[in-house]
Amino acid sequence: MPSRRMGEDPKLDSAQMALLELNRRMRTEADKELQVLSQSDTTERYALYRWGAWAHIIEYGNDEVPRPKLGQRCDIHMRVYDLKGKLYSDEELTVQLGRRDVPVAVDWNLQEWNHGAKVKMFVPWYSAYGLEGKNAIPPYENVMILLDVK
């Protein structure tokens, strides 16, 4: 637990400092791995989006319909894979943007894509399912997400 005296900033103990450093290193390694992966396929062009996600837009969708905005509901079809192609989940969902009903990288980047868009994303563990994982998805797992914005 951080120690703190009145009027001073909290001080982290050595275990907390070590954990923060470990997470920083793991985050850096995840970013490197996904950057290499996104640049290794010369047939698909990827761009770096918010929260460290690399995305390739397969279909742009309907640009005449306003894009989903923060606080609005949006229907999606989301398939989550490990980086070797093993399917972890396949779900049709209605999400409210900003509530983190889905991984943060998906939640925040949905505002960038039109209805009808199809997107392939490489998402680092820290903006996917984090240090706890979810159901079949292990902790600290970088994932590939195929997303259809309805």
Image: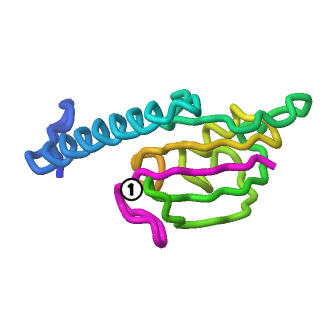
**Where is residue 106 shown, x and y percent of the image?**
60, 45
Q: Is residue 80 above or below residue 57?
A: below
At a point 68% along the width and 40% down the height, the residue shown is 110
- Does 111 lie within the magenta span? no
- Identify the residue at the far left of this view: 14
**Where is residue 119 shown, x and y percent of the image?**
66, 42
At a point 50% along the width and 37% down the height, the residue shown is 53
- Identify the residue at the far bottom of this view: 135
Query: Is 14 on the left or on the right of 24, as rendered?
Result: left
Q: Nearer the viewer, residue 22 or 13?
A: 22
Q: Nearer the viewer, residue 122 or 139?
A: 122
Mark 1 is surrounded, within 10 Å at the Cα level, by few (under 14), some (14 to 19) or many (20 or more) other residues, namely many
The region drawn magenta spans 132-150
Q: Which residue is mark 1?
A: 141
**Where is residue 137 shown, x and y percent of the image?**
45, 65
- Does 146 lie within the magenta span? yes
